[in-house]
Amino acid sequence: MSLNIKGIAASSGIAIAKAYRLENPELTIEKKSIADAGAEIARLEAALDIAKTELAAIKDHAYAELGADKAAIFEAHLLVLNDPELVNPVKDKVTNEHVNAEYAMNEVATMFVNLFEGMDNEYMKERAADIRDVTKRVLAHLLGVNFSNPSTITEEVIIIAEDLTPSDTAQLNRTYAKGFTTDIGGRTSHSAIMARSMEIPAVVGTKVVMEKIQNGDLVIVDGLDGEVIVNPSEDVLHAYEEKKAKFEAQKTEWAKLKNEATVTSDGIHVELVANIGTPKDVKGVQDNGGEGVGLYRTEFLYMGRDNLPTEEEQFEAYKTVLENMEGKPVVVRTLDIGGDKELPYLHLPKEMNPFLGYRAIRLCLEEQEIFRTQLRALLRASVYGNLKIMFPMIATLDEFRQAKAILLEEKAKLVANGTTVSADIEVGMMVEIPASAVLADQFAKEVDFFSIGTNDLIQYTMAADRMNERVSYLYQPYNPAILRLVKMVIDAAHKEGKWAGMCGEMAGDPLAIPLLIGLGLDEFSMSATSILPARTQIHKLSKAQMEKLAQKALNMSTAEEVVELVKSMS
Ligand code: PEP
Ligand code: MG
């Protein structure tokens, strides 16, 4: 039976393939007494063998696809499984206490996890995480429960998941993962953002895909209209194949503007730049005619691994991006961890409201060694291109001043040691907290530029969690309240002779672009795949007319009225 599921269009394009369910099972361990300890140990050994074979395959795959540092995680997992200090006590427990293997394994592993987690030593804390991960795999096999790992997929699939963390998304292999769809999430959740930079079609926030879709079902992910079609009829399949071909043809049309400047019909130039998450995304920026990078989300360097990246690793990543962008501007945002981007190895206490908590610049000003290491890597890399640095989640002038002072301190130390650092690095901030938008006139005196982070600015202004699909109707970029804040920021920048950009998803939204041109935004930073459609659109807009449009919109009372207005003008 064919089935249509509605969701939120998170990454454009159409993908058609068999479903692959990403299972992350909750394991229930019961204590049972067993009569034949020998047979139980044989069962344990069989589960261990399967887990080892799987991990060896994952390790090889990770090595080939993601490099040695990612593969090292799985090497560590294999070491745990081969460690007699873990395995022998499990066997002893089975033999001496006549209990089932899963119970014994769970007891012993929990004991080690608690022991290691309690130590005041980062390395041992990481070992606790390794033990927890591998134990889950072995327990799943003992219990006969499915346990999937997307990095082992070797055929074209659509990933079906309750949720994907940003690091799950980073591990997807673009060759095989043709699209994904999740129960949870919104357009600005980070897995959606990553899907766009990886150019994988995605529909999120469907609420029901895990319930309705089985492994092997044929699935169409329509990332243009936010629909998922399960086991389509021949006719529907054919219609989507055509829609896909049409979208590809449209992309070829857009590509003709790759090397053109972005100017309005009355000759005003704006910058169209890209958001990236890793050095690998630079190719997409070039292929899509990006005039620079407006947001490099460096936190992805810190994710999907067991420890902090070293200064050297970071230096290499930043240098690669700067060199490959060949002198075009590259705005690097310092570490913005927190919210939906977790770093388990920092062992931060769980918070009730992570989006309002200890994150981004707040954490960096506290954990200064992490921050200083990143700043040194950036400063050293600055000579390889046109670097601009920006700080995330700035709420007060004092935070900006402190962050800038630390940057200048690190710069002075490097220079004193004879390291060359670029002399003209612009230092700016993200405006994503309403307080800093309202006070933009004061900030503008001290920053070199603003970049408006509407994903957070909208969630904080509307008090609506960007991850929660039930309140996604409040993600309202066209709400006059948001437009007024955006205007305040742009006007404040211009008054001080500074530039204002936007790197939230609103910057690439075809309905918002006319308004933003009218409000005088200088730089639009978006997913690379949105650049050419945006350039096509901007070529047809007159700045003078858009100013009038924006003026009207600012005086309207609802987002719906603004949408109607924009639609009626185009
Ligand atoms: C934003 O908040 O708009 C932004 C660009 O940052 P992020 O999406 O990474 O929070
Ligand atoms: Mg943000």
Image (cartoon, rainbow, N blue to C red):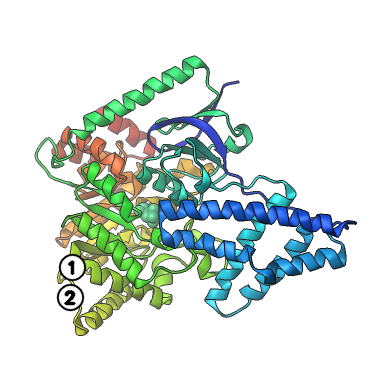
Q: What is the quadrant of residue 85 in the picture?
A: bottom right
Residue drawn where x is 17% and y is 46% of the image: 270
Question: For the view shown, which residue lies furthest in the right direction?
Answer: 35
Where is ligand 2, by quadrant?
A: bottom left
Q: Which label sits on residue 420?
A: 2
* Mark 1 to mark 2 CA distance (whole Å): 7 Å
Residue drawn where x is 24% and y is 77% of the image: 411
Most foreground residue, 382 or 316: 316
Q: Quadrant of the C terminus?
A: top left
Q: Residues within 10 Å of mark 2 (few under 14, many from 20)?
A: some
Q: In this view, does 415 lie above or below 185?
A: below
Q: Tag 1: residue type? A: Val
Check disc 1 and report its element: helix, strand or loop: helix
Q: Quadrant of the N terminus?
A: top right
Say whether residue 237 is left or right of residue 284: right
Return the x and y of residue 140 as percentages of the image width and height.
Answer: 69, 51
Return the x and y of residue 558 as percentages of the image width and height.
Answer: 38, 39
